[in-house]
Amino acid sequence: MKIINLQFPNKYSAKKKEFVLAMGYFDGLHLGHRAVIQQAKRIADKQHLKLALLTYSQSPAGFYVNDPVLKVPILPFRQKMQMLEKLGVDTIFLIDYNLTFGSQSPEDYVDNYLAKLGASVVVAGFDHTYGSLKDKADMKHLPRYANGRFEVYTVGECSDYFGKISSTRIRRLLSEGDLQAVNELLGYQFQTVGFVVHGNQIGRRIGFPTANQALEEKQLLPKSGVYAVRTKIVTGPLAGRSFNGMASIGRNETFGSDNPITIEINLFDFSADVYDEEIIVYWISFLREQVKYANAEALIDQLKQDRIDSLDLLKEIPKSKNYS
């Protein structure tokens, strides 16, 4: 898969029409996003064209809403690119979004970008917008701006019993710790990616050693608590192997109230040294809230129960479950 970085103003101009172009930020690559990409792929295959995506290196919404959480992606960029390649994307047109770029009129956006990317067909979700003047920068107006230079295909709403599948909804569910619902909407297991770093060794001293994960990229996390997880070792002698476990997100308040927030994973039936190795943690289900225990013995008793609860949950998740 090729990534082409676009600037503002745009200097890129394709020599021929060879793409079906899907456009959007695709935060999290959830089932709604996949419906858009899969429809674009079907059109591309039928017309013997390549599949391309026009997307952004950061969330456009983060520039217009005073909420720093919106600037943090659900899925790390590298994982997102890997998943897009698996979905059959040939080329990514990547825009470094900024307010100047976003202030273009919809007509200028089409003239300066969409019409110059070699697209025979442009595909997007029903609620996708582009450029300024949002009431005129929608999919209903796009055929007029295209003016015969490319076809337009709009993908309808993707929803379930509770409503529209959206990144906003997934973000809310993550903040509530509802990983089972999150994973259903994503169509894969929510994951954090990073490297194993040294911690304070408290887990080892109480019989529950942990691998502390330092995130490779900034990404959204579930709420503080304890979770059933499955962890894949990406590098080192154990690369490719996965292990059941339980993970904690929080400040470990039993041993002090000023501790930083950490991601600590206790891998079951595991004793190898994986310091500095890359791991992917797949978050399966919420177990309980973070609790400040009176002493280490009370914490140990709870961790024993957490292990039992985790194993009960994880035995229902086959190792072949879709992770991406």
Image (cartoon, rainbow, N blue to C red):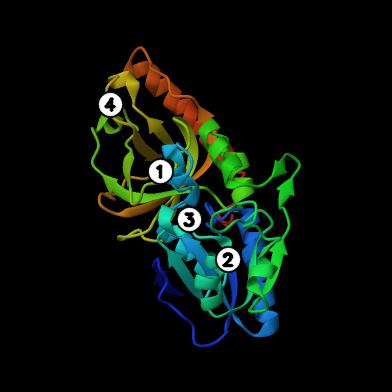
How far is mark 4 from mark 2, CA to CA?
52 Å
How far is mark 1 from mark 2, CA to CA?
60 Å
Neighbour class for label 2 at 10 Å: few (<14), some, many (≥20)? many
Q: Position of residue 86 (x, y in %)?
A: 53, 68
Q: Which residue is mark 2?
A: 107
Q: Position of residue 13 (x, y in %)?
A: 46, 80
Residue 230 in sight here: no
Q: Which amino acid lies under the numbered mark 3 shown in the image of this protein?
A: Ser
The answer to whether 134 appears left or right of 260 in the picture is: right
Secondary structure state at the residue bearing disc 4: loop
Looking at this view, name the residue that lies furthest to the bottom.
Answer: 15
In contact (CB < 8 Å): disc 4 and disc 2: no
Secondary structure state at the residue bearing disc 2: helix
Residue displayed at 56% across by 69% down? 110
In contact (CB < 8 Å): disc 3 and disc 4: no
Looking at the rendered structure, which numbered label has been put on residue 259? 4
Secondary structure state at the residue bearing disc 3: loop
Q: Which residue is mark 1?
A: 269
How far is mark 2 from mark 3, CA to CA?
11 Å
Closer to the chain start, of discs 4 and 1, is 4
Residue displayed at 57% across by 46% down? 167
Quarter containing the C terminus: bottom right
Residue in front for this viewpoint, 14 or 19: 14
Q: Which amino acid lies under the numbered mark 4 shown in the image of this protein?
A: Asn
Closer to the chain start, of discs 1 and 3, is 3
Looking at the rendered structure, which numbered label has been put on residue 103? 3
